[in-house]
Amino acid sequence: MLTASAWATPPTRTELIESLVSGVDRYNPSNVGILEDYLYHQIRSEEYDCLANLAILKLYQFNPDLYNPDVVINILIKALTALPFPDFNLCISLLDERPPNANPDEPDPLPTLLPILSSLHNLLQSCRFPAFWTLYRSDKAESLRDNYTVECVGFEDAVRNVVVHAVKAAFQRIGGERLGSYLNLSGDDLTAYVAKLGWSVNDATGVVTVPPNPDNQIESTVVQENIQLPQLVKVIAHAQVATVQV
């Protein structure tokens, strides 16, 4: 899972992109092409740079004539798999104003796909993983799959990484069938994926054991309060005064 430092400054970010994201040229519209090319590099290489993608959306906000709906959709697809970071909502916050469609021969796909992407995000964020895969595989999302996520290398595995992060935090053991529904995997594919994670499976019961980690270990905590007598006297005196007033 992506760390906060890697989120802010991905190790794959080049010096040129760093200068565009952090420097005085951040809002120069002539640089939008460079940032868009960088986005498509992320799509092809499984890399991710939220701040660079947010810079594109900000440029679109300031320069509506630069707006490219395909770029926006791809940014949202990449942000979808960044949970638990709030990237998707950050991107949505920059989409309040969109220019009217200037070319009726090429309708804007964003108004149609945005509700689907938002629903997918909500399902993933609320850990409703089987429902996520059902919607993603549905006819309703066919355009999203056929035209966009098919080009995003490793998209489904990135979603599974989000699932694994949640499972590791919530379970010590989980049924194989249930885990498969979360990951949208079954049979040999599920077995190979679990083995890749380094998790063990009980062949007799099919139960998957999740290795211990700080999030899934239940540890009792003893809280000891040291109250001095003068403090206790003040509490009792305050209670007596309140009783008399009543």
Image (cartoon, grey):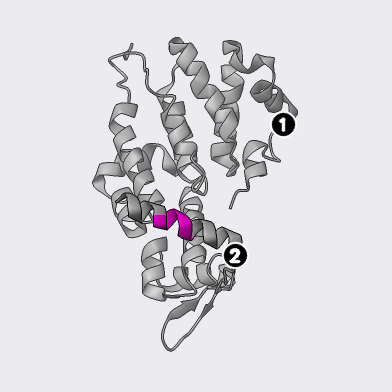
- On the image, numbered disc 2 is attached to which residue? 229
Please name the amino acid that badge 1 sits on: Thr
Q: Is residue 197 left or right of residue 135?
A: right
Give coordinates of residue 78: x percent, y percent. 49, 39
Foreground residue among 6 and 203 = 6
Q: Which residues are magenta?
A: 236-240
Q: Is residue 160 visible?
A: no
Give the answer, above or below, for where 144 lies relative to 179. above
| Image-quadrant location for residue 40 | top right
Crowdedness of circle 1 by 10 Å Cα count: few (<14), some, many (20+)?
few
Q: Residue furthest right?
A: 15
Identified at 57% across, 72% down, the residue is: 222
Q: Is residue 216 above or below residue 134?
A: below
Main SS, magenta residues: helix
Of all residues shown, which one is farthest toward the front?
244
Residue 244 screen position, x and y as percent: 34, 53
Residue 29 lies left or right of residue 106; in this view the side is right
Q: Position of residue 153 (x, y in %)?
A: 52, 45
CA gap, disc 2 and disc 1: 63 Å
Specify the amino acid type for callout 2.
Leu
Q: Image point 30% across, 21% down: which residue?
A: 107
Location of residue 216 with respect to 230 vertically, above or below: below
Q: Is residue 6 above or below residue 157?
A: above
Label located before the other in sequence (2 or 1): 1
Query: Which of the numbered marks, if any, corresponds to residue 98?
Result: none
Residue 239 among magenta residues: yes
Question: Residue 10, image x and y in percent?
Answer: 67, 39
Q: Which mark is residue 14?
A: 1
Q: How many marks?
A: 2
Let me know if residue 121 is in the magenta part.
Answer: no
The structure residue drawn at horizontal position 47% and vertical position 17%, both measured from the top left corner, is: 60
Q: Are marks 2 and 1 in contact (CB under 8 Å)?
A: no
